[in-house]
Image: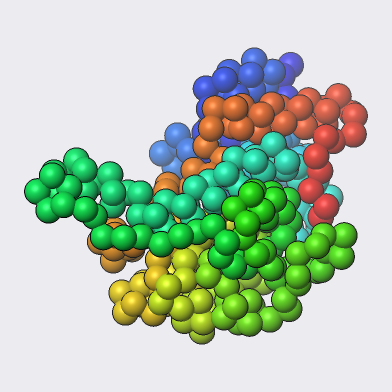
């Protein structure tokens, strides 16, 4: 008999097909009544398969007495009740490394797109403003500028590596220093923002980093400064961000994540110095396939009684 798993959020078709071939998959997102659905599958569900945005609440974890593992399609665990999982002795797996390059690539793309006003330029051509009004207003240079990275983990380091090709001066702040790296560490985020032309957020989400980038930090970055966020929307005080952009106290922003996804503040939609993406930094066929393969491999290892491939250190 196939092991039964609770799937909290959909995955790409190839992943769904592989999971359904190996397991009895219960699709929570399709249930008209979640409470009744959970009660129906609770006795037999031995695994949760979810993603970083949806996670797994303590309520769901407690609803499954036979739960043995939580496999997360992503690296963010702020939406998973880790203390509850730990209390019950339930391991959590994530999909690190395989998405690092794509997320770092998008961070750099957002920096360039925002600084050089690529979206505005595209509209300028399509709307015939170029033909009717002449040259578009000048943009600004990215190469050679100063960038502060908030959180120098896998993605942060990959961003820093890419920016070295632009001759940028990279500094960072993080929960711990990286003495093996040559980038200067700045303990105070406000100081880092003050000395940077760009602030790139790659820090983990969760309560400890909530609104880490606040009004003071945004205003320290300044009217020519650019904020880029490919981490979690919760790291930025979104109300303060909108206010800083509307008042001109912040120069621009490239955002892949938001506080209440998929809902984006209406004010951000109206600002042409802002570039918006739908939480899609890892959204390439290659990366999402590799992430799915890792989820499948972790589940297979667990049910075979073998060591997990990428357990989250909980």
Nearer the observer, 176 or 87? 176
Residue at x-position 73% and y-position 78% = 187
Residue 231 seen: yes
Residue at 35% over, 54% down? 117
Q: Residue furthest right?
A: 306
Q: In this view, does 14 lie to the left or right of 294?
A: left
The one of 183 and 41 positioned closer to us in this rendering: 183
Would residue 153 appear left or right of 257 to someone viewing this image? right
In this orientation, does residue 159 appear?
no
**Can you say whether 173 is above or below 110 in the image?**
below
Quadrant of image for the C terminus: bottom right
As drawn, 142 above or below 240: above
Q: In which quarter of the image is residue 310?
A: top right
Q: Where is residue 50 in the image (x, y as percent from the top left)?
A: 61, 41
Q: Residue at x 41, y 39 (%)?
A: 32
Residue 14, position in %: x, y? Answer: 57, 20
Question: In the current view of this chain or complex, which residue is farthest to the front?
Answer: 134
**Residue 21 vertical placement versus 55 (above, below):** above
């Amino acid at each position: 008999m196939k092991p039964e798993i609770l799937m909290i959020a959909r995955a790409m078709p190839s992943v769904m097909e592989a999971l359904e071939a190996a397991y009895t998959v219960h699709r929570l997102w399709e249930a008209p009544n979640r409470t009744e659905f959970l009660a129906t599958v609770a006795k037999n569900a031995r695994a949760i398969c979810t993603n970083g945005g949806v996670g797994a609440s303590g309520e769901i974890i407690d609803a499954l007495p036979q739960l043995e593992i939580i496999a997360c399609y992503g690296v963010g665990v702020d939406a998973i009740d880790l203390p509850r999982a730990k209390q019950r002795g339930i391991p959590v797996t994530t999909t690190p490394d395989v998405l690092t390059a794509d997320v770092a690539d998008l961070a750099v793309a957002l920096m360039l797109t925002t600084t050089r006003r690529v979206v505005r330029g595209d509209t300028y051509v399509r709307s015939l403003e170029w033909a009717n009004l002449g040259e578009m207003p000048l943009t600004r240079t990215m190469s050679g500028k100063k960038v502060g990275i908030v959180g120098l983990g896998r993605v942060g380091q990959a961003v820093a590596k890419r920016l070295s090709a632009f001759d940028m001066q990279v500094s960072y702040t993080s929960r711990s220093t990286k003495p093996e790296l040559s980038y200067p560490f700045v303990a105070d985020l406000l100081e880092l923002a003050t000395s940077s032309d760009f602030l790139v957020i790659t820090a983990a989400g969760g309560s400890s980093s909530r609104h880490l980038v606040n009004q003071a930090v945004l205003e320290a970055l300044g009217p020519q400064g650019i904020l880029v966020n490919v981490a979690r929307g919760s790291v930025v005080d979104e109300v303060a961000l909108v206010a800083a952009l509307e008042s001109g106290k912040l120069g621009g922003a490239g955002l892949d994540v938001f506080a209440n996804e998929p809902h984006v503040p209406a004010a951000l939609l109206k600002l042409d110095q802002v570039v918006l993406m739908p939480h899609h930094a890892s959204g390439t066929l290659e990366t999402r396939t590799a992430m799915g393969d890792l989820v499948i491999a972790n589940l297979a290892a667990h049910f075979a009684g073998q060591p997990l491939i990428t357990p989250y250190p909980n």
